[in-house]
Amino acid sequence: MKVDLWTPSGGFTLEPNAFTAATDTAGHRLLIAGPGAGKTEVLAQRADFLLRTGQCPYPRRILAIAFKTDAASNLRQRVADRCGRDLASRLDSYTFHGFAKRLIDSYRVVLTGDDALDPDFQVGPTRIERRQITFDDMVPLGTAILEASAVARNAVRNTYSHVFLDEFQDCTTQQYRLLQAAFRPESAMLTAVGDLKQQIMGWAGALDGIFGDLVSDYGAEPLYLYQNFRSAPRIRRMHNAMVRVMDPEAAITDADLAGDDGDVLVEHYATAADEAVGVADAIEQWIAHDGLSPSEIAVLVRQQASLFALELMNELSSRGIAFRNEQEVQDAFSEPLGELILDFVSVAIHARQPDAYARLMARVAPATDDEEFDQMNAARWRRRIERSRSVLSEPDGHGEMLLLEVEAFLDEVGDDTLIALSPSYANRGWFDELRGSVFASLAMMIEQGNGRLDALTHVNDDGAVRFLTIHKAKGLEFHSVIVLGVENETFWSRKATVNRSEFFVAVSRAKERLVLTVAGFRAEPPGVYRWDESRSPQEEFLGYVAELD
């Protein structure tokens, strides 16, 4: 396809700056955009443009780097939806740590001295000479490989013609050094997107001047997107009240945010127990009477859900409302292999999982040019799924039996198909390690549910309310968002700007409804010390809601 004939895929209309960012062929770009401005969609459309017009010429690939596995997975799926799985297979979407791990797996022999690693090295909580590295070791070791080996550098540079950098405001010194080692001198065209108002990784070393570094080091040209396409007008006006404090030049007039659509509510409760009942009542109403899918509801906490949301989770459980605590779902499940296993588990133990079923069949029984073969293959897999459902529906069906069914399912899929799910799986050591990690995580979830299969009915997020930390929620969006504990004891710190950024990220996840809760008393959880049981409202944050009246 000629460049000038390309139009956005999926019926989307891009505003001028977004269209420029998607179709630029001349240089590096820094796209500065607020929440709901469509940053991820611009990257997906850019991938579609590059692949369909041949600006990323075969066999070269696109590298996308995000900060979270679910964000990387989201972009991967969006690109597949825009240009089809064949073209999308030429996009590698990783986290910084995931990209570094693949460098280590491929070029481990470059590492010498104290960094030397055995072929069967593992990733674990502590560093063990030659045998084990920690999560924090990955990026420095990946950088060391690129800086030491021309072979590794050339391999990376010859593989990727374009690089996408999501949530770039949170890039750390170590991550930026990895980026420079890989792609400087300029061997690939960079497209970075971010928003300084959502910089919430300062505790992890995020660089304050990272946007300026990209401009000075790579000559990246900034582009600005201020329009919020995600949220209803009342929610956007609350955002804008915060923007006037955080970044006055980015604020827009209230006249541009006219309309009364959307709900922004503050709910005060005497205790966390009262909060649990009140919030559960609301969620039950939204699902049972308003027809809202549970997956369109998110409960956000600043810290661990087990500390701030345990009573709410127990209340939902008592009412039979499915939920998923993201702390229990490890990164391995965001890999294509993990997603495949979760979809199989979902349809094997619960027949009413149409989205999971469709994804599963698309992977195990993809369409070919042979219609008769496709029908026979699809029928074979339907029978296979029904056999698993029959086995697991027996009175003695339990978690161990499920693990055996998953193992048998993967054997039938075959290694060739499984390895084809991701280019990184060609590294058999990494693939085997990932498979073991997914099984270990699944076994842990079964154990936490006392072996009951109904505890895994909603292992994917298709039919469950999601509990997330604010950091985990970044990049996601939901119809209704509940932010628990908007209290000084939750959000207060000496760095008020960090607090504002975290709160801004939280409230900007909501599309149609935002609920903020405050409890006057939260009992000290077991094993937690220095806990303030008496709570006080965070007046600044709640004040942004008051401005709406």
Image (cartoon, rainbow, N blue to C red):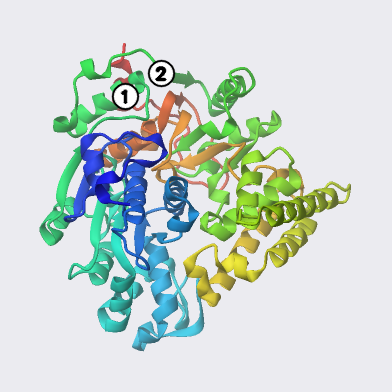
- Can residue 216 be seen here? The reply is yes
Label 1 element class: helix
Residue 484 place in picture, x, y as percent? 46, 31
Q: In the picture shown, does residue 180 fall above or below 279? A: below
Question: As rendered, which of 297 and 230 lies closer to the eye?
Answer: 230
Identify the residue at image location x=20%, y=34%.
246
Please identify the residue farthest to the bottom as the structure is shown: 113
**Total numbered circles:** 2
For the point 17% across and 56% down, the residue is: 27
Given contact means CB atoms under 8 Å apart, are the residues at marks 1 and 2 in contact? yes
Amino acid type, residue under disc 2 in the picture: Gly
Choose the circle earlier in sequence order: 1 or 2.
1
Viewer can see residue 111: no
Q: Amino acid at mark 1?
A: Arg
Quadrant of the drawing holding the C terminus: top left
Q: Position of residue 201 (x, y in %)?
A: 31, 50
Q: Kindly identify which numbered label has been placed on residue 236.
A: 1
